[in-house]
């Protein structure tokens, strides 16, 4: 069993109250940082820890913090991105609803490190009940003197606000999030300027994922070097994986990075294998936007090595034979899953969530969805398969924000690894159009 | 000052200039097309992706190429930057894709569209696109909406460039319209089907690159290439009064603001000048308006139009020979 740094006490009765949380060592990092460390020392510890952004891109958090512009007399902001809406990813919701004080503690320590006196948690609109939990916890923190003026007598002031979004996936993109937080339509901004220079209200801003911020207290308490000992290579620490799909035990697991994928799927400690004794067909390893991989490639890399749950190992082989760790939304599909239908479903999501600002994404996501719908329902042609790849290629890299890529990658990867299923949907259109129809190697319906 | 190399041509521009504006200083056929960027409007650009270019070297300090194509209209230049536009096949290929994307939900009703002939999308598709489409699904459609007695909104044709939104936000007092909805269901709208009621609302018609916003006093009166543009001015208490009158015979069919060669309005005009003063006696005539762009309007008139030399170079050789034998057009640079 790996170490649990974030979720050790998650099931303790009443851990969402300040009192119980304090009993289990809560807010130690705030005391340590504010009383004994300078802000730069905290940044240095985070840098040493090798913590990488847990929201999907995996950019080193310490490095992101050190890019923050610090002009004199200009306020800076820390914004926590809690707009978790990627299909398959549901780790932040659990973390915030069970351990609200962990996020608040992380926000205080991180804001101190960055010199921010006002910080925001931008939470997805659908998670209204989590917002209430957070607000209750923030009120407790204010009452106990962890927030507000002159925290713990250190002379450092911090106000923390929770702001609900309208429930748009696009507002999880950092600049769209900032626009939305400013009260505007959630359209991503053109970059440059980057948020570290001109972010919220055109001030220097850092946007971090919930899990990244929740890891900061642990790093401050134990030291960056200690944290960096967990994991493999440049993937350090622990990661929350939200496992779903055809697994015996779906749920949220905190794993030490470096765990073999095979162990994660099949060991009883984690997901406990594929349900109903069926065979694994494919895995989407990091939320719906990362490329799907068939069983052979998710368990072993193209070179035949064991695939590990790390940023590097999962992306081994590029997009030809690899994928990404992404946000940790682990979707397993058994042999009864129709890949075409699944791809159509993902595509429908991106079509619905595209903000419509730039033309390749606005038009392309809808186009891909319609072509996939046609293929799935038995009206497709062989040319449509290449058309899908071509449209995906026209979107990828040509959009303002990464949603374009997020929409294009799953489609391109599904065709790359499961072309035979798309072809079967054309050659056996009638059978394929029946509900629940799935391609099998011998061509038999399930 | 920053020195950049654009398609092999060196140009020096002030710091903070965008790549597109640097290219416009060079001029000619190397200028990337722009469907959403509009110099007078703050914050415009970056949306249509028509102006994507490749940055082969980021700057003199950091000469690495940029990983993705960048929107030239919103990316500022750096000293020593090397940019490839028409010299890079990838850029031209992507641009073809952008045309295709912009056209898949466009109704292509040019034969009945008032904008035809002076439509940015038409020009863009003609110059950079392919003549066929691979799209066979149903196109999105909207009902026509009258926003006020003078302007009609036909969302079906809209390419969501946001120009009219910025215009309404920036040159008039009240924010009256914006974008509702998301993705390809997004629409320009007033909340809720309100009318736009202010003295400068007519400018949204001028900035629209397609026929989504049209002048109701001009709708279906004439094809634009049958009208003659004439510069005129009057003393107007609200605006500069510098306009272009579009004549058919002796009648002023419509009035628009003056535009530069990139289709950008030079001075905003008020609704009184645009919609009400339709008699020659209201105006002081200055003379024929010169249309600098390659458009069908300039191909039909008393003023000899200029055919861009670079366009000629792209024509098939037989056509070029014909052109030289009996030149119907004056050849420009």
Image: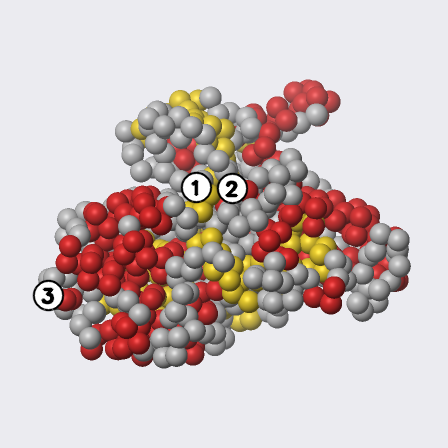
Mark with earlier residue (1, 3): 3
Asked if one can make out residue B250 in the rendered structure from this viewpoint, the answer is no
Q: Is disc 2 in contact with disc 1, using a CB cutoff of under 8 Å?
A: yes
Q: Secondary structure at mark 3?
A: helix
How far across and down, in percent of the image, does residue B246 sit?
A: 51, 51
Mark with earlier residue (2, 1): 1
A2 lies left or right of B4:
right
Q: Residues within 10 Å of mark 1 (few under 14, many from 20)?
A: some
| Chain of the residue where label 3 is placed in the rendered structure | A
How far across and down, in percent of the image, does residue A412 sit?
A: 66, 47
Mark with earlier residue (2, 3): 3
How far across and down, in percent of the image, does residue B121 sit?
A: 58, 48
Q: Secondary structure at mark 2?
A: helix
> Can you say whether A18 is above or below B57 in the image?
below
Is residue B102 or residue B262 the one in the foreground?
B102
Q: Which mark is residue A153?
A: 3
Q: Which mark is residue A234?
A: 1
Which residue has dot 2 on it?
Answer: A312
Q: Secondary structure at mark 1?
A: loop
How far across and down, in percent of the image, does residue A384 sit?
A: 77, 49
Write the residue at 52% across / 56% down: A328
Badge 2 and badge 3 both on one subunit: yes
Distance in Å between CA atoms under marks 1 and 3: 38 Å
Is residue B249 or residue A379 the one in the foreground?
A379
Distance in Å between CA atoms under marks 2 and 1: 8 Å
Figure disc tally: 3
Badge 1 and badge 3 both on one subunit: yes
Write the residue at 35% across / 50% down: A227
In the rendered image, the residue lying farthest to the front is: A1
Is residue B332 or residue B174 the one in the foreground?
B174
């Amino acid at each position: 069993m790996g170490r649990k740094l974030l979720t050790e006490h998650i099931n303790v009765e009443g851990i969402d109250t300040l009192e119980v949380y304090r009993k289990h060592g809560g807010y130690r990092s705030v005391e340590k940082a504010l009383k004994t460390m300078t802000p730069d020392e905290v940044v240095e510890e985070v840098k040493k820890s090798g913590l990488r952004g847990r929201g999907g891109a995996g950019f080193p958090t310490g490095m992101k913090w050190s890019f923050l512009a610090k002009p004199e007399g200009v306020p800076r902001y820390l914004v926590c991105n809690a707009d978790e809406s990627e299909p398959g990813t549901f780790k932040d919701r659990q973390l915030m609803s069970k351990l609200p004080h962990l996020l608040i503690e992380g926000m205080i320590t991180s804001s101190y490190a960055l010199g921010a006196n006002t910080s925001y948690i931008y939470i997805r609109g659908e998670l209204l009940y989590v917002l209430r939990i957070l607000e209750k916890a923030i009120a407790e923190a204010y009452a106990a003197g962890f927030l507000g003026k002159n925290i713990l007598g250190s002379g450092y002031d911090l106000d923390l606000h929770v702001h609900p979004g309208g429930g748009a996936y696009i507002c999880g993109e950092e600049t769209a999030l900032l626009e939305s937080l400013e009260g505007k339509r959630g359209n991503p901004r053109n970059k440059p300027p980057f948020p570290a220079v001109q972010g919220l209200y055109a001030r220097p801003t850092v946007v971090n994922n919930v899990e990244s911020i929740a890891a900061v207290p642990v790093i401050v308490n134990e030291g960056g070097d200690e944290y960096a000992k967990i994991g493999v290579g440049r993937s350090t620490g622990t990661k929350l994986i939200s496992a779903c799909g055809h697994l015996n035990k779906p749920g949220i697991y905190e794993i030490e990075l470096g765990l073999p994928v095979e162990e994660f799927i099949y060991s009883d400690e984690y997901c406990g294998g594929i349900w109903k004794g069926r065979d694994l067909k494919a895995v989407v390893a990091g939320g719906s936007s990362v490329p799907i991989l068939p069983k052979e490639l998710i368990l072993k890399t193209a070179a035949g090595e064991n695939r590990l749950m790390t940023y590097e190992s999962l992306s081994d082989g590029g997009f030809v034979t690899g994928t990404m760790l992404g946000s940790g939304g682990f979707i397993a599909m058994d042999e009864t899953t129709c890949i075409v239908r699944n791809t159509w479903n993902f595509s429908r999501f991106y079509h619905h969530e595209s903000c419509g600002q730039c033309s390749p994404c606005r038009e392309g996501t809808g186009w891909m969805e319609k072509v996939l719908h046609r293929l799935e329902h038995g009206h497709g042609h062989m040319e449509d398969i290449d058309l899908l790849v071509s449209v995906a290629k026209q979107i990828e890299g040509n959009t303002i924000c990464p949603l374009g890529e997020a929409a294009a990658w799953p489609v391109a990867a599904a065709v790359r690894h499961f072309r035979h299923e798309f072809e079967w949907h054309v050659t056996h259109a009638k059978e394929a159009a029946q509900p629940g129809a799935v391609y099998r190697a011998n061509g038999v319906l399930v | 000052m920053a020195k950049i190399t654009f398609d092999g041509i060196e140009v020096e521009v002030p710091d903070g200039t965008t790549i597109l504006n640097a290219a416009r200083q060079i001029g000619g056929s190397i200028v990337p097309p722009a469907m959403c960027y509009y110099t007078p409007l703050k914050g415009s650009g970056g949306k249509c992706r028509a102006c994507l270019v490749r940055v082969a070297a980021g700057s003199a300090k950091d000469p690495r190429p940029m990983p993705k194509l960048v929107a030239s209209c919103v990316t500022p230049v750096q000293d020593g930057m090397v940019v490839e536009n028409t010299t890079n096949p990838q850029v031209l290929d992507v641009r073809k894709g952008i045309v295709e994307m912009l056209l898949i939900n466009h109704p292509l009703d040019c034969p009945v569209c008032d904008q035809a002939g002076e439509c940015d999308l038409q020009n863009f598709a003609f110059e950079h696109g392919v003549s066929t489409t691979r799209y066979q699904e149903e196109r999105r459609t909207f009902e026509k909406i009258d926003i006020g007695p003078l302007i009609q909104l036909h969302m079906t044709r809209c390419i969501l460039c946001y120009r009219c939104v910025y215009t309404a936000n920036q040159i008039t007092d009240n924010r009256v319209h914006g974008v509702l909805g998301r993705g390809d269901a997004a629409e320009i709208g007033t909340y809720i089907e309100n009318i736009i009621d202010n003295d400068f609302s007519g400018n949204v018609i001028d900035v629209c690159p397609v026929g989504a916003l049209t002048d109701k006093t001009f709708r279906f009166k004439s094809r634009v290439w049958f009208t003659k543009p004439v510069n005129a001015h009057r003393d107007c208490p609200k605006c500069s009064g510098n306009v272009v009158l579009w004549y058919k015979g002796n009648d002023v069919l419509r009035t628009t603001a003056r535009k530069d060669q990139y289709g950008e309005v030079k001075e905003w005009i008020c609704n009184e000048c645009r919609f009400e003063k339709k008699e020659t006696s209201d105006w002081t005539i200055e003379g024929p308006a010169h249309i600098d762009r390659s458009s069908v309007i300039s191909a039909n008139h008393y003023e000899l139009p200029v055919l861009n030399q670079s366009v000629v170079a792209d024509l098939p050789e037989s056509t070029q020979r014909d052109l030289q034998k009996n030149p119907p057009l004056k050849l420009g640079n």
